[in-house]
Amino acid sequence: MNKGNPKRQGKHKPIVYRFPFAAVMGQEMVKKALILNLINPQIGGVLLAGEKGTAKSTLVRNLGQIAPNMEVVDLPLNATEDRVIGSIDIEKTISQGKCAFGSGILKKADGNILYIDEVNLLSEHIVNSILEVAASGVNHIEREGISIEHPARFVLIGTMNPEEGFLRSQFLDRFGLYVAVEGSKNMVERKEIIKRRLAFEHNTAGFIKVWQGDTEMLRNQIQEARKNLAAVKISETVFKLTADIVNAAYCAGNRAELVMIETARALAALAGRQNINIDDIKEAAELALPHRKREKPNNPQEPQQNDQSDEATEEQPEENQQDDQEDEQNDAGDDSEDQSQPEASESPETGDGETDDNDADDADKEEPEPPEQPDLNELLDQIDAIGRTFMIKNLNIKAVDRKKRKGEGKRIKTKTDTKKGQYIKSAIPRNTINDLAFDATLRAAAPYQRVREDNGLALIIKTEDLREKLREKRTGSTIVFVVDASGSMGAKKRMETVKGAVVSLLTDAYQKRDRVGLVSFRKKDAEVLLNITRSVDMAEKCLRDLPTGGKTPLAAGLLKGYQVIKNEQRKNQDLLPILVLVSDGRTNAAIMEGNPFTEALEMGRRIAGEGIQTIVVDTEVDFIKLGLAKQLAAAMGARYYRIEDLEADVLAEAVRDLSKESSF
């Protein structure tokens, strides 16, 4: 037997030994989700999200060991568009003299498992292609003289580390199931994991043979469950309970119900039953709802109150100050009650000395309370601590133009004219070619080889065949935070929450290699606390020492933030500016004479007209909400978030509570 150079062994590929699926210790929920998709591909795949080194990729890549008639097809992060969806087969096109189609990864994935490792880092244009095909089950190609379509139904499986970024909601919803993966905390399990891995590396063939029986048993279970799947019945009670659970989770659309039903069917088939029980529904909810569950929407009556309040605010700008004074009045409320009680007690018995003495004693006992209440002057100028910080959700910011940039960072994907970015597609060159797309050039020239004079050349390429590479890379942005530090923010420790949220945003900016600036507005004007810098620590220090108090010159804050960005744009033409306004939208101080809020709206429209991307973080927490920040966001064309919406979704700890006891 020849064990020498692999080239002498013909076209046979070298044997690749993989760690047995059945030998992976722990991660039972991950295994269950993967097996359910093999039993019933209608579930729609699974997304495994968790820290590195938790066997996510190992389990997925070894699915072929237990998947009857299916194989795992890898989609690399650096795959180009033509490699994914298919393009011209250069060899056949040259030899035949006409366009011939060369299938891509999606064709190979038809009827199989399409696996994307680090799916959250996949290029946007590739994501769009996969979304379209995943929705229709058909890959339709119209490019380079080719018009063809082919079926592309696959089980979509992705793995990711949330620390490196999130998925946009459209792509996330395409994964039927979601599992949050964590490393084992059990010391016995951790020791066994190490032993098994070392045994595999020491004697690979022997280790695989030891686990061969478990692998075959698992494979047979999946085959048997596939046969049982068609016999599983769905009762009306199952439909109702599923709809109730999904409704209680406030999921958008109906995909959640469909995925839950298909998952419950697979669970019943795996157990050898023909009926779905309550445990199947509970387990299906745990897998299908975590990435779809949403917070309870606002009370539908609130917008009516907001509209009325907004009209009143526009007619009487001075009323904006009332909300700033409400907390002060509430603080003084106890004093008012204390003053009214003696008057009430004096009216029944004005001449009773004992009553007066008792009242005096009661007053003495109540004297220590006033010092605990904040003094009005202190309230108008105080420094709050930084509140709780958290992981920021993916804000999904994109470049608003097609300009090529040279910066470095991790925030925004943009086209680049350097040779460092990822090659995403080709284009006909407009000027001198600096980055030749050789593959695309060959595809353009291939159909015309038979009609061109060869002149002794194997391949004739003309000027019109030349193509250049279009590359894409991530770059950092410049974020200017405009923070409301007026007196109203000091009430109810609101500024403490705001500072915690802004520090969380600053931490996210540091991770994405953004440059930041900080502007605050209070009393009669706005000031630049920190000019554009990469030092997030300096920004955090300025924020920590930021006092609150005084009026709310919102328009002045927006103007100052706008000026900081424009000054920086004069220095750096590649700037990607983002203005983040943190405010409740209330204002009672104008730059010029007039309505302060109207002035703020005009300033917001001016910023939008300059093409500056904006984010409005609404800090309003009162029971009756005016909704002014939302109005301002609409005028600015800004992304609108409530301050509590910034926090990344805490994936469901237990969706079991959404199910209620029921009998079948």
Image (cartoon, rainbow, N blue to C red):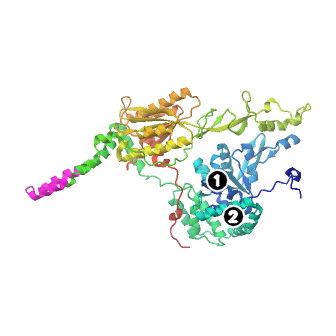
Q: Is residue 80 above or below residue 609?
A: below
Please tell me whether residue 191 belongs to the stretch shown in magenta: no
Q: Which residues are magenta?
A: 336-364
The quadrant in which the C terminus is found is: bottom right
Q: Classify 10 Å Cα crowding around label 1: few (below 14), some (14-19), many (20 and above).
A: many
Work out whether mark 2 precedes mark 1 in sequence or the reverse, and give the earlier one. Answer: 2
The residue beneath circle 2 is 23
Residue 535 screen position, x and y as percent: 51, 36
The residue beneath circle 1 is 159
Q: Classify 10 Å Cα crowding around label 2: few (below 14), some (14-19), many (20 and above).
A: some
Which residue is more in the foreground, 81 or 47?
47
Q: Is residue 631 above or below residue 288?
A: above
Which residue is more in the foreground, 411 or 138?
411
Q: Is residue 338 above or below residue 213?
A: above
Q: Amino acid at mark 2?
A: Ala
Tag 1's secondary structure? strand
The overriding secondary structure of the stretch rendered in magenta is helix
Residue 46 screen position, x and y as percent: 64, 57
Residue 615 screen position, x and y as percent: 50, 40
Query: For the view shown, which residue lies furthest in the right direction?
Result: 456
Q: Does 298 sit left or right of 23 as displayed?
A: left
Q: CA distance from mark 2 to mark 1?
A: 20 Å
